[in-house]
Image: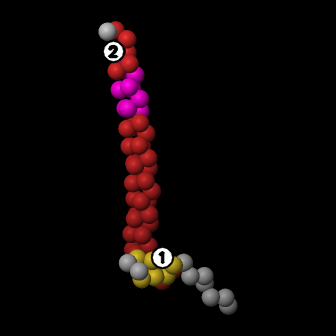
């Protein structure tokens, strides 16, 4: 029978076989991966918000300058 393919992850320069982890450890790993994705999306959203704010602020300043 073929040996199950190892799924490795490196944590603090140590490689771990995900298949050898307990169900609880795999669950924690899944939480970490999900949180990494959520943090990346939050940073993406913050970038969008900052650029949008700058655009609206620029539009406001331009509009105020037109009135002078």
Q: State the mark number for residue 20.
A: none
- Nearer mark to the viewer, of 1 and 2: 2
Q: Which residue is mark 1?
A: 9
Within 10 Å of disc 1 (Cα), the crowding (few <14, some 14-19, many 20+) is few
SS label for mark 2: helix
- Mark 2 or mark 1, which is nearer the start of the sequence? 1
Whether residue 23 is visible, yes or no, is: no
> Chief secondary structure of the magenta span?
helix
Q: Which residues are magenta?
A: 52-60
Location of residue 34 by image quarter: bottom left
Compared with 20, 24 (above or below) is: above
Residue occupying image coordinates x 56% and y 82%: 6
The colour scheme used here is: secondary structure
* C-beta proximity under 8 Å, tags 1 and 2: no
Q: Position of residue 59 (x, y in %)?
A: 40, 22
Q: How many marks?
A: 2
Compared with 24, 58 (above or below) is: above
Residue 57 lies in the magenta-colored region? yes
Identity of the residue furthest to the right in this view: 1
Front-lying residue, 3 or 13: 13
Q: Which residue is mark 2?
A: 64
Front-lying residue, 40 or 1: 40
Residue 14 lies in the magenta-colored region? no
In the rendered image, which quarter contains the C terminus? top left
Q: Is residue 37 left or right of residue 5?
A: left
Whether residue 9 is visible, yes or no, is: yes
Identity of the residue furthest to the bottom in this view: 1
SS label for mark 1: strand
Q: Position of residue 54 (x, y in %)?
A: 38, 32
Residue occupying image coordinates x 45% and y 77%: 10
């Amino acid at each position: 029978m073929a040996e199950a393919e190892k799924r490795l992850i490196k944590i603090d320069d140590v490689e771990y076989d995900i298949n050898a982890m307990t169900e609880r450890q795999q669950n924690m790993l899944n939480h970490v991966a999900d949180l990494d994705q959520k943090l990346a999306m939050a940073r993406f959203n913050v970038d969008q918000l900052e650029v949008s704010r700058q655009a609206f602020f620029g539009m406001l300043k331009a509009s105020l300058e037109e009135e002078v």
